[in-house]
Amino acid sequence: MKLSVIGVGYLGAVHAASMASLGFEVVGVDVDHAKLDALRAGKAPFYEPGFDELLAEVMPTGRLTWTDDYAAIADADVHFVCVGTPQRRGSHSADLRYVWAAVESMIPHLRPDSVVAGKSTVPVGTAAEIAERLGQSDGPVVVWNPEFLREGFAVADTLHPDRIVVGVPEGPDGLRAEQVMREVYAAQIAEGIPFLVTDRPTAELVKVAANAFLATKISFINAMAEVCEATGADVVTLADAIGHDARIGRKFLGAGVGFGGGCLPKDIRAFSARAGELGVDQALTFLRQVDDINSRRRDRAVETARELVGGSFRGRRVCVLGAAFKPDSDDVRDSPALDIAARIHNEGGEVVVHDPKALVNAESRFPALTYEPELAAALAGAEVVLVLTEWRDYRELDPLAVADVVAAPRILDGRNVLDAAAWQAAGWSFRGMGRAHG
Ligand code: UDX
């Protein structure tokens, strides 16, 4: 069976290489030549642990090719649509221009007996619109097959996902497409990974519902952090205690500077916008609060750091540890760390940002900040240190050694990952997010 993957960003590039590693012949198509050139050379165009190794394994087999020529998809049996669906400028809804551009480019090359499998995160109803555009009767069958991969774990999440969801249309076409998708995912099914067949709107909704739930869980614990701050309670202990309840679970109860990235923020906004179009906006009003709680955490981090330096950032050297929206990623889209760094810079702080992988992307987004690739140099002379992305390098910092290089031992642990007692014992003024000690 031959597969095509349209859009070779995070999702598409990893999907293409993973499917090739399972033995399929795969062609990845994109209009971005920089990405294609990197992939052809066997290099990941983004930082993703394990992805370079996967490319090194599959590129020599000849089963995986990268091209900008849509004609190359003509003999594929399944076409995975993996293009981005960013937030529309000036609105909360999703911008589907790349989806439609991909569909239009595919049309001249699609065999009627092929299957188009959408993987991009889209507003519910998009699969049906695509099916309409492709022609209900003689066009290929459109199925929806959402992707749940996390950056930093993209390869493992693609090869061994928690579940596979495929939304198919009713009737014989749907049944045929389901069989094709079962062949595509035969290895995962054999592994015992749940394979759920649904209608198309349910499959589209599964993805946004999952992301909305995860965002809500994070904002829930961050709302508790606000209450902890007002009462002297400790949100980390609170999360541990409620997390022991198996119905709640400890995962995604990490209070701190909140969620960011290319998915959760824009997906909850697009989901609310779609609910509005469908006349059920009240059902998702709470997602606006989820977003608001999330942005208040960034305000709180700036306030706490300002307090630590005595009320004003003007002329103060501020060391920001972390630019990526989470560790093991070089992605700075809607990154809380970078947003906080930029706000402090705008208040007159002399901000120096360090990150093990994301500095190039951070600098292209906010060129005005100072970026320092050496951790020791970033810390040197700092009047306050902010840990805003929980990279291992930062979790393992030695408070005594760091105290020797900074100008003043003051630290904000924006991800609640440091041992407060050890830092305080080493003479640091230590603040967390929603923590009893400050
Ligand atoms: C997310 C979903 O997890 C994934 O299933 C979906 O396909 C895409 O969106 P990703 O954006 O890679 O994946 O990151 P994720 O690990 O979910 O983290 C999202 C954000 O939440 C990060 O900024 C992270 O720092 C933050 N987070 C996560 C918290 O603030 N607290 C937590 O407890 C967990």
Image: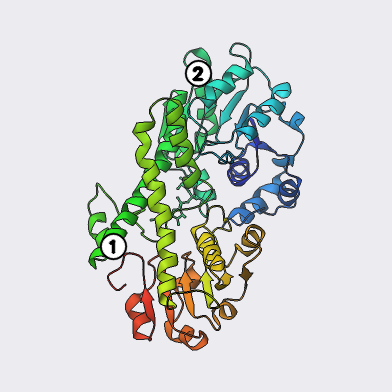
Which element carries disc 1, helix, strand or loop? helix
Residue in front for this viewpoint, 254 or 92: 92
In the image: residue 120, left or right of residue 66: left
Q: Name the quadrant of the N terminus.
A: top right
In the visual, does 409 lie left or right of 108? left
**Residue 363 falls in image quadrant:** bottom right
What crowding class fits label 2: few (fewer than 14 Cα within 10 Å), some (14-19), or many (20 or more)? some
Give the Cα distance between marks 1 and 2.
48 Å
Q: CB under 8 Å between callouts 1 and 2? A: no
Query: What residue is at 28 percent from the left and 56 percent from the top?
Result: 224
- Disc sitting over residue 174 in the figure: 2
Residue 137: x and y in percent read 60, 11
Circle 2 sits in a helix, a strand or a loop, which is it? helix
Q: Nearer the viewer, mark 1 or mark 2?
A: 1
Front-most of 91 and 81?
A: 91
User: Residue 212 at what x, y percent from top left?
Assistant: 40, 41
Mark closer to the chain start, 1 or 2: 2
Q: Residue furthest bottom?
A: 404
**Left or right: where does residue 186 sit relative to residue 421?**
right
* Image height of 253 relative to 175, above or below: below
Identify the residue at the far top of this view: 137
Q: Is residue 196 visible?
A: yes
Q: Quadrant of the C terminus?
A: bottom left
Mark linked to residue 235: 1
Q: Is residue 414 visible?
A: no
* Residue 183 in the image, given as x and y percentages of width and height: 53, 29
Determine whether 304 is above or below 30 in the image.
below
